[in-house]
């Protein structure tokens, strides 16, 4: 139960950090998208570092269904635990969005109208997810003590070098459709993101992890 609670709470706080910093950045930046993205990326990276460092020893600090899928493929957890992790991650992500709305006195139930679609965006999400999973896998093997910083810096950089702003997480994509703020994504566009992310995860677990096992 500790690991399940850690995944729920960690994912909820991750989304609260993402959505809250996006809203704050856009508000204080008076609509300047560059200022909003800068604040959003720095806060997300800093928050991830803290969450992974503190909750990693408890649950592995996945906060991401495709990370959990890779861990299952590598034999680090069984099928039942993977499925429960997914429930915790998706539900925690939505709760994190609602918590942000409460903190900023916004309507709790929202639907995003921000379009994020097109082949460039989908390719970006595929690349983002592949990069994230590769960093996690290689960091776990080669620099485990620095893994929280590696992931945090990768996500911070990813906000700026990808057209999709590095969602790389199906739970994040779904939850962000429930907020009509700076970080939102129109519900109709969520499927494209999730498909790209899952495809990247399948490539990772089907090729990279298999090649490691063969070696």
Image (cartoon, rainbow, N blue to C red):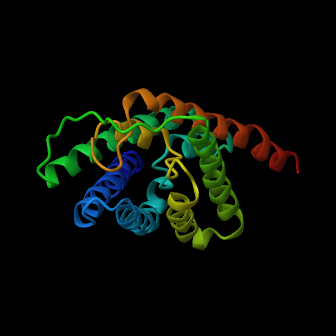
Report the side of 196 relative to 209 (left or right). left
Quadrant in which the N terminus appears? top left
State whether residue 105 is above or below residue 87.
below
Q: Residue at x 58, y 59 (%)?
A: 161
Which residue is situated farthest in the left direction here?
105
Q: Nearer the viewer, residue 140 or 33?
A: 33
Q: Quadrant of residue 86?
A: top left
Report the side of 144 relative to 190 (left or right). right
Q: Residue at x 84, y 46 (%)?
A: 211
Residue 191: give x, y in percent of width and height. Answer: 49, 28
- Tell how many labels: 0
Q: Residue at x 64, y 40 (%)?
A: 201
Residue 116: give x, y in percent of width and height. Answer: 46, 39
Which residue is situated farthest in the right direction here?
215
Residue 77: give x, y in percent of width and height. Answer: 58, 43
Residue 205: give x, y in percent of width and height. Answer: 71, 40
State whether residue 6 is above or below residue 146.
above
Q: Nearer the viewer, residue 128 or 98?
A: 128
Q: Nearer the viewer, residue 198 or 83?
A: 198
Q: Residue at x 23, y 66 (%)?
A: 28
Report the side of 108 relative to 15 (left or right). left
State whether residue 134 is above or below residue 178.
below
Report the side of 164 relative to 187 (left or right). right
């Amino acid at each position: 139960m500790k690991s399940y609670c850690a995944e729920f709470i960690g994912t909820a706080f991750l989304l609260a950090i993402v959505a809250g910093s996006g809203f704050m950045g856009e508000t204080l930046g008076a609509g300047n998208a560059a200022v909003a993205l800068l604040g959003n990326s720095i806060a997300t990276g800093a928050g991830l570092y803290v969450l992974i460092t503190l909750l990693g020893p408890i649950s592995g600090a996945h906060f991401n269904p495709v990370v959990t899928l890779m861990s299952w493929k590598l034999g680090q957890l069984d099928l039942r635990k993977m499925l429960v992790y997914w429930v915790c991650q998706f539900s925690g992500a939505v709760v994190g969005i609602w918590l942000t709305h409460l903190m900023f006195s916004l309507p709790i139930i929202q639907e995003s109208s921000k379009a994020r679609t097109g082949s460039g965006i989908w390719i970006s999400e595929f690349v983002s997810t592949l990069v994230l999973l590769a960093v996690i896998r290689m960091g776990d093997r080669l620099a485990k003590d620095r893994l929280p910083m590696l992931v945090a810096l990768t996500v911070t950089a990813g906000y700026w070098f990808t057209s999709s702003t590095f969602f790389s997480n199906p739970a994040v994509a779904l939850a962000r459709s429930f907020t009509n703020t700076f970080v939102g994504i129109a519900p109709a566009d969520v499927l494209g993101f999730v498909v790209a992310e899952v495809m990247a995860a399948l490539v990772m677990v089907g090729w990279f992890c298999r090649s490691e096992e063969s070696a």
